[in-house]
Image: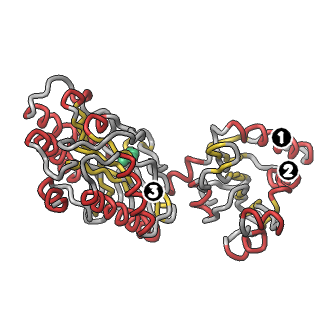
Amino acid sequence: MQQMGADTVAIIFSAPPTYRSRDSEYAYRQNSDFYYLTGFCEAHAVLILSPGTSTPVTLFNQAPDPKMEQWTGPRIGQQDAVNHYGVDAAFSIDQIDEKLPALLANKKLIYFPWGENSIRERMSKWIKQAMQNTRYMPWPDLTALQKLIETMRLIKSPEEIELLKESARISAHAHNHAMQFIKPGMMEYQLAGEYIHQFTQHGARDIAYLPIVGGGKNACILHYIANNDVLRDGDLVLVDAGCEYQYYCADISRTFPVNGRFTDTQRAVYNAVLNAYLAGLEKMKPGSDWTFVRSAVDESLKLGLRDLKLPGELSEYFMHGPGHWLGLDVHDAGPYKIDEKPTIFKPGMVLTLEPGLYINDWQIGIRIEDDILITEQGHEVLSKDSPILPEDIEQLMR
Ligand code: GLY
Ligand code: MN
Ligand code: MN
């Protein structure tokens, strides 16, 4: 609200429930910005921030309804929203059309989730209503709310860092378990299921994203979520899987041999990726930025391609970025540029490092991906519990 300034208002919407088929819902997941600001996990809620007014934080949420609660479970309601969620006033969501125009009266600037067209129509209705009720109110400016929040979300608080550590710890453990669980002949989706089993057994109810389990040539497909092939003796498997622990994501990739032993060719490609990982890791420190990481990773991978005698450009074998911000979203909110310049790494930022090589002709795809916290001294690898050295992976699999 300090950033928003006077005579402004922000409108933040909860995530809509989504359906998998007919009336069967997907598990509900709150919108990350809404969760970041409120900790409030119910659907059908709208948060209003009006800095400088007598009720700066207003929540519209579901009203208690014993009949509905018999079917769908308890609701927090208005009283507990005020008592436990730091809001100054709470009203039933059924009253939003009636009450919101008054909250928009005489505001010069409205922050709202830009780009969500379904919301635009309701917004104009509310603004028109506000103008009808208010003399001399000019049409307010509208601006994207995301910009303010994403800058806040870029630096994690100590509490957020604890949750990210736990998320990475649980996910690293699941990778180690999978290395011991895998057997030639197993289906890729069976290995994916084992990750989810491990996540839940260790306290993480959700996955941060659909696990990618690609055996052999499937590892070259970057977002391979079909997971419907056999894991074959002699192939590598690339698994990109992370849990979501109390809303915070892990994003870890490990590549390991289905039968527990790398072939010479697989080991050579693996080591090229490992060298690029280590080169990138050196650039994970305060004062550095993504351009340093990118060039360290690229330079190292180019040397690797030369040693492997692979023809052509690096972009034919490595076609994604070296990493991204990590937090409430797996590809977390946060600017990659500030004032046209690359965002400088600072303590409290959390990001992934994920070099890879995808060689279609050899049916080998390898990615090593870890979750990294920038610290005063340099960095801490949050996913360090899972090995990345080929000999350590082989030993664990034995
Ligand atoms: N799992 C998605 C990514 O690595 O960015
Ligand atoms: Mn990633
Ligand atoms: Mn990943």
Image: 126 above or below 164: above
Sequence-wise first label, 2 or 3? 2
Q: CA distance from mark 2 to mark 1?
A: 9 Å
Mark 2 and mark 3 in contact? Answer it, CB < 8 Å. no
Q: Is mark 3 within 8 Å of ligand 2?
A: no
Residues packed near mark 1 inside 10 Å, few (<14), some (14 to 19) or many (20 plus): few
Residues packed near mark 3 inside 10 Å, few (<14), some (14 to 19) or many (20 plus): many
Name the residue nearer the viewer: 131 or 190: 190
At label 2, the amino acid type is Asp
> Which numbered circle lies on residue 125?
1
Sequence-wise first label, 1 or 3? 1
Which residue is rendered at x = 10% and y = 39% of the image?
Answer: 265
Image quadrant where one finds the C terminus = bottom left
Residues packed near mark 2 inside 10 Å, few (<14), some (14 to 19) or many (20 plus): few
Residue 249, percent from left and from top: 44, 57
Residue 41, percent from left and from top: 63, 62
Identify the element where label 3 is drawn. loop
Q: Nearer the viewer, mark 1 or mark 3?
A: 3
Q: Can residue 200 be seen from the camera position used here?
A: yes
In the displayed structure, does residue 169 sit left or right of residue 309? right
At label 1, the amino acid type is Lys
> Which residue in the structure is indicated by mark 2?
97
> Which numbered circle lies on residue 302?
none
> Which residue in the structure is indicated by mark 3?
327
At label 3, the amino acid type is Gly
Name the residue nearer the viewer: 328 or 346: 328
Sequence-wise first label, 2 or 1? 2
Image quadrant where one finds the N terminus = bottom right
